[in-house]
Amino acid sequence: MNRERILVAGLGNLFRGDDAFGSEVARRLMTRDLPSNVRVFDFGTRGYDFAFALAQGYRSVLIVDSVSRGAVPGTLFVIQPEQDELEQLCGDGFCDPSHDVNPMTAIRLASKLCKNLPHLVLVGCEPMDLGDEVEGSVGLSVPVAAAIEPAADRVVSLLDELCRMPQRSFSELQ
């Protein structure tokens, strides 16, 4: 188990408009030259796969997803939640029911599968349009599409910081 490995986890439903944000950022990052200890994966709506990945001994996991927080659509957030803050995020729109297992449930499952969860960082984007459960919506809104490249840049910047830091000095990222 290499505790220096870092996972970038793109989450999102391609059939729910701006919920595809995390998947789109992950795809963009897959075209970039990243450190060899970084793995980028587009989990889409596969929450069980995400949960099992969290339990695979990564040092840190950067979760990229749409996050409804009442801001202007396209606004980017970087959140380093503690366990109690993760619970609040679920109420704040982070846990989209269109994923087979929402991110919070995946994190809870992973905490049962492994002794120590990795350091988690959420890179989120305020959505404009998530479509609806019946008809859905394909394609990102203009403000969220415009946030893809800046979000990818922010993830790369966070990866650079994480790769330079000693294993337990995560609080310095704030």
Image (cartoon, rainbow, N blue to C red):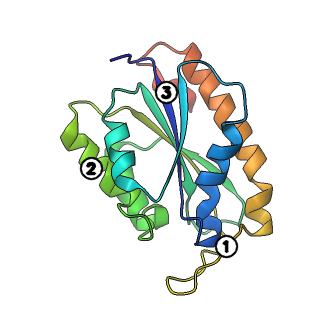
Answer few, some or many: residues within 10 Å of disc 3's Cα (few below 14, many 20 plus, some between 14 and 19). Answer: many
Q: Mark 2 and mark 3 in contact? Answer it, CB < 8 Å.
A: no
Name the kind of residue labelled 3 in the image. Ile
Relative to residue 125, is residue 61 drawn left or right? left
Work out which quarter of the rendered image holds the C terminus and state it: top right
Judged from the image, the secondary structure of the residue bearing numbered disc 1 is loop
Q: Is residue 84 visible?
A: no
Relative to residue 129, is residue 63 drawn left or right? left
Answer few, some or many: residues within 10 Å of disc 1's Cα (few below 14, many 20 plus, some between 14 and 19). Answer: some
Where residue 6 is drawn, which disc sits there? 3
Name the kind of residue labelled 2 in the image. Arg
Q: Which residue is mark 1?
A: 138
On the image, the x and y values in percent for residue 75 come to: 70, 58
Q: Is residue 37 visible?
A: yes
Relative to residue 109, is residue 87 drawn left or right? right
Rounded to the nearest angstrom, the CA distance separating label 2 from label 1 is: 30 Å
Q: Which residue is mark 2?
A: 108
Name the kind of residue labelled 1 in the image. Val
Q: How many marks on residues? A: 3
Which one is earlier in the sequence, the residue at label 3 or at label 1? Answer: 3
Q: Quadrant of residue 100?
A: bottom left
Number of the front mark, 3 or 1: 1
Residue name at image x 37 percent, y 42 percent: 82
